[in-house]
Image (cartoon, rainbow, N blue to C red):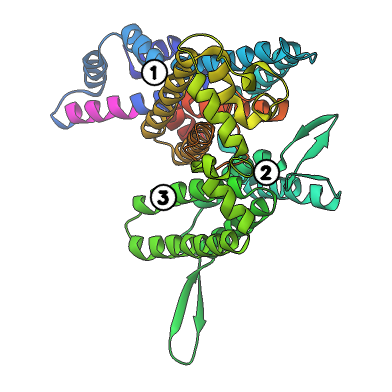
Amino acid sequence: MDIKNFINNVCKEIKYKPVKEGIAEELQLHIQEIKEEYVNNGMQDSVAEEKAVSQMGEAEEIGKKLNKIHKPKLDWKLVILIAILMSFSLINSVLKETTTNDKYIIKTIFYMVISIALGIGIYFFNYKKLKKYSNVIYLIATAIMILPIIKSVTLINGIYYDNIAGIRFMPSMVAVPIYIIAFIGYLVSYNKNNIINIKTEEKELNINKDFVKILILSIVSVILIFVHSVANAIILSFVYLVIATVKILQEEEKRGKKLAVIYGTISVFIIFFLIFIVSTPYRFTKIIASFKPEDYAQGAGYTGMLQKEVIQNAKFIGEAETEVISSNDYIIGKDSIFTFIYLVGKTGILVSGILVITIILTSVKLIFNAKNIKEQYGKFLIIGLSSLYIFQSILCILMNLNLGIKADVNLPFVTYGAVYFLVNALSIAIILSVYRRKDIDVYENSNK
């Protein structure tokens, strides 16, 4: 059998067409190398080709193995974990509907169907196309943050809420993942040779334009988020820090200097934040009351005392015997940020413990996915969006247990809300899209 027929027989077994050309080229080069070695040893051209082909093995068997390896893959483990998280959202809706007249169940199912349908579209979309639109993505996130201010949207407890088609949502929660995607695009496109020279009387400064651009745009985004939500600004800063640290550690030059600039900038923000907190006594009191609600039981610690009562009366299975849970008059059952402690009170420690275990397993799975992705842009998309999910989950649960500062942070996939659910679903869909191409990326790139 000659090389051409052998390769054709191999490719017949490969179902995913975009990788066929790359695999064919790789096989062609490999067999050609073996053939040339035989020819150099004095063998005739036709005999050398036949022997090189026979050395490869059975074409059909090779094709089946390559097809199994190099085909789009769905991360079923992650899908199952997310489905379990979604089921908790349904449980939450059922519990709320039994105590109110609102149609929580129907709305939740509707949000889920829409989110899953859009998520499937994102799953089949080639995520790498997002990179070239990083500027557009950044501007979209900025518009989301600025429009509520221009529209003079009413603040609720000092937080901006926008309203689209009767659906109320926090713009900062929508903009944060969009800013992260834009930031990753800038970081992956970073060119270390994009230098400008600035001459002074004493010395010549070499400044990387891409580095300055990334630094300025990230600071602007954090400030815009800060105006809307202090908690989400802190989360965005931490995600930026994680992504930038990993990226810098991958480089060979000036790692210490770049890390010093990044962490120095973060330190400045931390100082300004502390000054901001100290200069506004009610915020400082609110922070202290988050950990010691009993010291401010009639004021800033009132909600914390309600949470404490739920925890103290929580059963292993079943509803806690406290009016805080049985009545609809308390904030625990009304405000979405208290979803976790509401579930603890309504269902018991066992069910809420299963939720915590699911969140931990999902976090671990996301970390392993990031580790196993080789393509840089996809790898950082998983790192960034996974960090966002992990930080939000940790902060929300700690806050609900009086172990963290009270903040406007929802529990991904569990907290009730159409827009939040959609944003979380699309973020996971992007991660699944990256995972889908993890074994075919090299051949798709070679075709291009």
Give the residue furthest to the bottom.
201
Local SS, label 3: helix
The residue at which mark 1 appears reads as 4
Q: Are marks 1 and 3 in contact (CB under 8 Å)?
A: no
Closer to the camera, 23 or 384?
384
In this rendering, the label closer to the viewer, 1 or 2? 2
The residue at which mark 2 appears reads as 172
Residue 61 in the image: above or below residue 337? above
Q: Residue at x 61, y 12 (%)?
A: 91
Residue 133 in the image: above or below residue 34? below
Residue 276 location in percent, x, y?
60, 62
Whether residue 74 is visible to the viewer of this picture, yes or no, is no
The residue at which mark 3 appears reads as 247
Q: Quadrant of the N terminus?
A: top left
Closer to the camera, 177 or 238?
238
Alpha carbon distance from label 1 to label 3: 43 Å
Q: Would residue 335 appear left or right of 284 to someone viewing this image?
A: right
Q: Residue at x 50, y 29 (%)?
A: 434
In this rendering, the label closer to the viewer, 3 or 2? 2
Quarter-of-image position of residue 60 = top left
User: Which stretch is magenta?
Assistant: 28-39
Amino acid type at mark 3: Lys
Amino acid type at mark 1: Lys
